[in-house]
Amino acid sequence: MGNQAIVSVFGLVYGFQISNTSYGIEGAALVLNISCMVTNFSGLLTGPILKRYSPRVVTAIGVLLTASGLILSSFASSLWHFFLTFSVFAGLGLGLIMPASFMAVNSYFDTRKGQAVGLAMAGTGLGQTFMPQIVTSLQEAFDYNGTVLIMGAISLHGLIGALMFEPVERHLKTVVDGDDVDDLKHSTEVVIVEKKSEEIALLQSQKHNASEVKRYSGNVENTQCSDVTNNNNIEMDMKNTPTRGGEISPLKRISSALDLHLLGDATFVHIIIGLSVVYTSSIAFSMLFPFHLRQIGFATAETASCMSALSAADITARFTIPKLARRVRIGYRTTFLFGALVLACCRAVLAMQTSFPATVAASALCGYVRAATVINQNLTVSEYCENNKGSHLASALGLNMVSKGIFVLTLGQFFAWARAPTGSYVSCILIQSAFLLAVALSWGGEMVVLRRRRAKSSLPAPSTAAAS
């Protein structure tokens, strides 16, 4: 609530502050885009860090960095000050908080994971709902410096949330062989966890030693992305890696640590490109939306109300969309696809509104649909990991973040420059909608092709008589 909502109010706080200088709206967009780039390029670090440290530690470090960036940015007076404080410090902090929070929730749930992530992200939505109102009130009572200092103090409260990320290992139950269940069922609660086929074979070969107790964390779908499996696979990759003089080359070590082999899968690359385009569009829309409302004549209070309506609908959707998707039995990627398609249409409608009631209604509709893309960002990557043995969730999330950083710095800046020829923010929003539509069509085409290929491969071979 206190940290991940910062980006949603960037336009209200930093955007107007920077745009009033000689740098203009392009300078404000560059500060935000570099911040998002740093946030996402930190994915090169978060993958290995999350394998070594718990989400609690990583989140606490991220909170301290984010709060430090906000507090220091209150004294910024030139563009490079904003780059160093907000873009680097706060950007890096958010880059640690986001994947660590997702990993904390993901480690606790095997089923209804989408609903769990939606409930967890409702906190972010609450922050996005109330933060515009809080910022507006702070700006009326204090100047820019006081507002940002108080935002930094609010950010520090994230340390309380980080302390609540208890490691899931503290709550795991002991897994024993079947012969020992009768002896322990009266003294402790025993949970038998599904094991991977290799682990089952190992236990069967050691069945004579019924007293041997082992611990497992996860089921057959999630253990492939667990930290233990990641470390084991890395060790196996290193053992199978050709070396010179008995030593593994630094490049091979980096490749194994980051699981760069994922980039060899065209489906994974297509997924992260689509996620990056939609993410970049959302970031650009969040920054340009208050400027668009000001351009059509809305006051500060009306602008904040539209932003709050968007965020409130977003929160409602985070409670309801996972349940709807589960009821109709569609996957995370399919839900994301439909969300991107409908969001493109809703934003185009929003850009055409000029009256306050219609704009509020259109903002709420965009917020509700946007939640489908926000919730399923990381869940789409997680679904890929579950469907592809050998993939690693922490590294896959990190590579996805790097991809988003590249697109934010390139495509995000293009969205800011798109206003220059017409001077209207409507054209920027329509261009963003076109990119969302392109992602939906591209993903839909790939899914249709893959489904047809699977259907053909599952058909029985024709008999000789039938062929003749």
Image (spheres, rainbow, N blue to C red):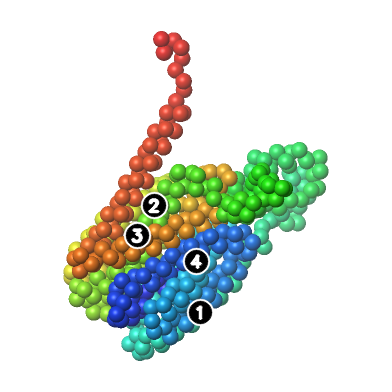
Q: Earlier in the sequence, mark 2 or mark 3?
A: 2
Indicate the amino acid at tag 3.
Leu
- Please name whichever residue, 296 or 362, is drawn nearer the observer in this view of the structure: 296
The residue mark sitting in front, 3 or 4, is 3
Q: Marks 1 and 4, how far apart in space?
A: 14 Å
Indicate the amino acid at tag 2.
Gly
Q: Marks 1 and 3, how far apart in space?
A: 28 Å
Q: Earlier in the sequence, mark 1 or mark 4?
A: 1
Task: Tell me the residue at 54%/76% (across/down).
Answer: 64
The residue beneath circle 1 is 68
The residue beneath circle 4 is 95
Q: Earlier in the sequence, mark 1 or mark 3?
A: 1
The residue beneath circle 2 is 274
The residue mark sitting in front, 2 or 3, is 3
Task: Report crowding for label 3: few under 14, some 14 to 19, many 20 or more residues within 10 A (C-alpha).
Answer: many
Figure check: 17 above or below 321: below
